Image (spheres, rainbow, N blue to C red):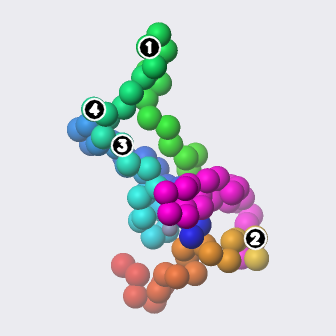
Amino acid sequence: MTHLAGGAFQYGHYSIQRCAICGKALVKYDLRCLAVPAGEKNNGPGYWQVGSLVEQDGNRTSLIGELAEDFKAEDLPPDFCLWELDLESAE
Ligand SMILES: [Zn+2]
């Protein structure tokens, strides 16, 4: 299923980035467990750019594109999570 990357949120030693549409976690980190190779600078955890279309398939997550400001419904992937959402009852 494809999701739309929302903003990342960090609290304490946890960090999470969720889908802006359905709220599914796209990235989760326990910052205590983040390893940095010896001799390299710690640039912090990586996130999807906000507005990225991110496909999740089991444990595989990949970037399939970005949502343009003037996107059209027919540009959106057929497995986009928005299509699964019941907008009438969404709160
Ligand atoms: Zn989603």
Residue position marked by numbered label 4 in the rendering: 32
Residue shown at the point (58%, 46%) measured from the top left: 49
Residue 52 appears in the figure:
no
Residue position marked by numbered label 2 in the rendering: 75
The kind of residue on which mark 1 rests is Ala
Residue 37 appears in the figure:
yes
In terms of sequence position, does the residue under pointer 3 or pointer 2 come before the other? 3
Residue position marked by numbered label 3 in the rendering: 29
**Quarter in which the C terminus is drawn:** bottom left
Q: Residue furthest left?
A: 12
The kind of residue on which mark 3 rests is Tyr
The kind of residue on which mark 4 rests is Arg
Q: Is mark 3 within 8 Å of ligand 1?
A: no
Residue position marked by numbered label 1 in the rendering: 38
Q: Are the two marked residues, 1 and 3, in contact with CB atoms closer than 8 angstroms?
A: no
Q: Are the two marked residues, 4 and 2, in contact with CB atoms closer than 8 angstroms?
A: no
Residue shown at the point (76%, 76%) measured from the top left: 74
For marks 4 and 2, give the CA distance.
39 Å
Q: Is residue 83 above or below residue 55?
A: below
Question: Where in the figure is residue 84, as x and y percent of width and height?
Answer: 52, 82
Quarter residue 36 falls in: top left
